[in-house]
Image (cartoon, rainbow, N blue to C red):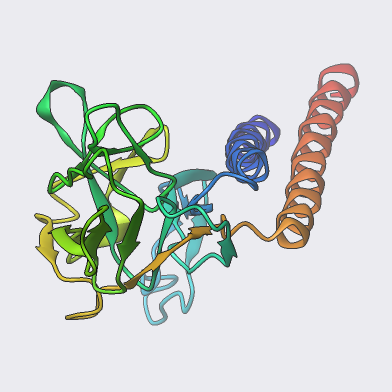
Amino acid sequence: MSSSAMHIARTGLDAQDTRMRVISNNLANVNTTGFKRDRAAFETLAYQTITAPGAQSTAETKYATGLNLGTGVKVQGTARIDTQGSLTQTGNSFDLALDGDGYFQVQLPGGDLGYTRAGNFNRSPEGLLVTSEGYQVMPGITVPTNATQVTIGTDGTVTAQVPGQTEGTNIGQIQVASFANPTGLQSTGDNYLKETASSGAANLGIAGEDGRGRVRQGNLEASNVNVVEELVDMIETQRAYEVNSKMISSSDEMLKYVNQNL
């Protein structure tokens, strides 16, 4: 019995260690633009059925509950919490935030497409709207080199004011990608997500339509990490880790007693 208890406690240690890593990553990215916090989900391991419910206890009676012993816990997976982060005004005309659901589409190296909530964009020497790493925002937007002002509407329409013209020139429209199951997107680092079979294919459309968020120029979305909540979760995880560690010590003492006295 004691050895089984040690094994169960060990699975608890592993699970709480993983949860602490998730919390640590959330806190590390508290100031990361557009970051969405993760949550660790747990599930029980297989149960050992010693006595099945309904089994015959005597010739005339049956067990009402039976005897099932659990074998521990494991981390089922991590779920991304896609709640809206607060919008911070920057005044930079190429800083964009999505007020609502959806993602900006970016062309990654090798031709792959990535999706992000981080809208801290810049203008390349060629005039293209790009990320801080130089990845092109899709569909491509080319800003004239002599543009004196760039205005981006809430629907993603981009207009540029150039010398000699009284009205702005429409130079394109930033589209927003939506997914049937956004939590199925795979995090790849550098604030990018990739499409998976679970997320479904990206559906590009106009910002503000069909449930997509609106574009807010001159703003950036902060992370949705609540430091106080994460610290509470961290304390809870630490206490659970300590309890599982004490369980291993107690099981070890029980085994020692049996070996020395029986």
Residue drawn at x 20%, y 62% is: 165
Nearer to the camera, 235 or 122? 122
**How many discs appear?**
0
Vertical relation: 188 (above or below) 159 = above
Nearer to the camera, 172 or 116? 172
Question: Position of 3 compared to 194: left or right?
Answer: right
Residue 215 placement (x, y as % from top left): 34, 68
Residue 71 placement (x, y as % from top left): 52, 44
Name of the residue lying farthest toward the top: 260
Q: Can residue 178 be seen? A: no
Vertical relation: 111 (above or below) 56 = above
Nearer to the camera, 73 or 211? 211
- Could you tell me which quadrant the C terminus lies in? top right
- Could you tell me which quadrant the N terminus lies in? top right
Name of the residue lying farthest toward the front: 164
Nearer to the camera, 117 or 15? 117
Residue drawn at x 27%, y 49% is: 185
Residue drawn at x 64%, y 35% is: 17
Question: Position of 167 compared to 27: left or right?
Answer: left
Question: Position of 212 compared to 140: left or right?
Answer: right
Residue 162 placement (x, y as % from top left): 25, 53
Residue 208 placement (x, y as % from top left): 25, 78
Q: Can residue 67 be seen? A: yes
